[in-house]
Amino acid sequence: MIKVDISNVWGQLALPDLLAIEKDVFDAHMMLTDGTGAGSDYLGWLDLPVKEETEEIRRIRFAAERIRKNSDVFVVIGIGGSYLGPRAAIELLQGTNHNIGKGKGNPQIYFAGNSLSTRSWNELTRLLEGKDFSIVIISKSGTTTEPAIATRALRWLLERKYGTEEARKRTYAITDPTSGALRQMATEEGWETFLIPPNVGGRYSVLTAVGLLPMAVAGIDPMEVMAGAYAAKEAYDIRSFENPAWLYAAARNLLYRKGKAIEVLEGFGPSFKMMGLWWQQLFGESEGKDGKGIFPVPAEFTTDLHSFGQMIQQGQRNLFETMVRFDPPAQKLTIGGDYKNLDNLNYLEGKTLDYVDEQAYLGTLQAHVDGDVPVITMDMGPLDAAKVGEMFYFFELACGLSAYLLGVNPFDQPGVEFYKRNMFRLLGKPGYEK
Ligand code: PA5
């Protein structure tokens, strides 16, 4: 189990605060499991973790094997909940430079359709020159502008390179089983498809093919991810503060009530960055509505201690932190000696980099607590594919609980339509003239 420690928030909260909210957390959990809360049509994510391999997962494995064999590059098209999860998992497990040295047999993975950047598109087309590639289009609605534009362009590239028939075999779609433009396109073109169940919203979809296919192409076993998620589904069903998801949801809600409107989620090292962005989207779209919500800010330590660390230490006291730690990796790096010692680092000779990192963490924790910042800590234990599955389920559950504690629907995102409507009007999309 993930260990959530709230001992460093006691300066701002008291035990009676926690006990007073216990019934609300219980009710929020019941609303999720009984389907009695707002947005209850979108609770399918609770049942996505499975113990046995399903037919869908078996097909994911086969497709991944095919892609691994015939592609130097696999392009994942999608935005928001249709891309952040798989990217987070791959980077956390394989690092931000996971594409280096990869090719056929173990393809490089790039993400497209998550912006409208011409520069990114030019980079991708340059990168695909002379390479064998396959694509997966991920869109629940099938109508999202960014991935739809990327789909058009990548389909054209595929068809020009391989001709219609081979391009068809190299195109996969992950979408709603019956509705939407992507479903219709996939049916007409004869692409292999995987499902986003109708009762699973985008940001809760990482444990479907949305996450599992790109992970499998990256060489991450979908059933290992599922094993962690399934164990989490069982373990995090406890209805008390022994449940770390309860503790996390309750502490952040209580801190919000005390004026802490910003949460900074901190991982130590660049490979956590995308997980931070997945978390940000999950909580941001789920909680930020009706004039409420904790503003989610992902951060990378120690890097950002040399950036907005100053703001955390001495700026406005309107934030709290959640620090995420994993066990150090087995491969150690020891700091060497230097007889001149001009950098004055010989006091670290023989120490591992992990040891220095651990002291940086402890030092930061103490400094921020001394600076009146409440800090929740999460000890994740060892990092592997099962842990990633566990983390996805844990944060989704904590997010559902948190949103119900706030009194908002965790599963809609009406505010996202506003920019789209204006953009469509400016672009002259039929039906958006006014
Ligand atoms: O979480 C969500 O629902 C959104 O972030 C969607 O995932 C995102 O807007 C992409 O939507 P779609 O999968 O329909 O293209």
Image: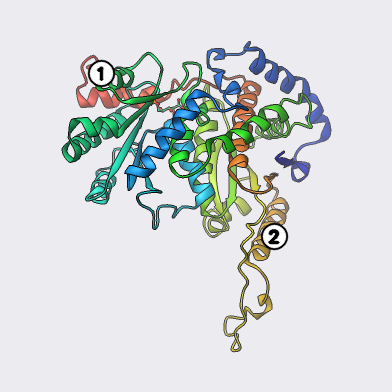
Front in this rendered view, residue 292 or 162: 162
Q: Is the residue indicated by label 1 positioned so its CB lies within 8 Å of ligand 1?
A: no
Q: CA distance from mark 2 to mark 1?
A: 59 Å
Q: Residue at x 21, y 30 (%)?
A: 165
In the picture, the disc for residue 188 is: 1
Furthest-right residue in this view: 16
The residue labelled by disc 2 is 363
Percent from the top left, x then y, of residue 232? 67, 32
Q: Is residue 336 above or below residue 154?
A: below
Q: Residue at x 50, y 42 (%)?
A: 88
Q: Quadrant of residue 25?
A: top right
Indicate the secondary structure of the residue bearing disc 2: helix
Q: Amino acid at mark 1?
A: Glu
Q: Name the quarter showing ligand 1.
A: top left
Q: How many marks?
A: 2
Q: Is residue 81 visible?
A: no
Answer with left or right where residue 297 lies relative to residue 185.
Answer: right
Front in this rendered view, residue 419 or 194: 194
Q: Earlier in the sequence, mark 2 or mark 1?
A: 1
Q: Is residue 271 above or below residue 225?
A: below
Q: Which label lies toward us, 2 or 1?
A: 1
Q: Residue at x 46, y 26 (%)?
A: 202
Percent from the top left, x then y, of residue 296? 55, 38
Q: Is residue 109 above or below residue 209?
A: below
Give neighbour class at mark 1: few <14, some 14-19, many 20+ (Cα, 10 Å): few
Front in this rendered view, residue 390 or 274: 390
Image quarter in which the N terminus is found = top right
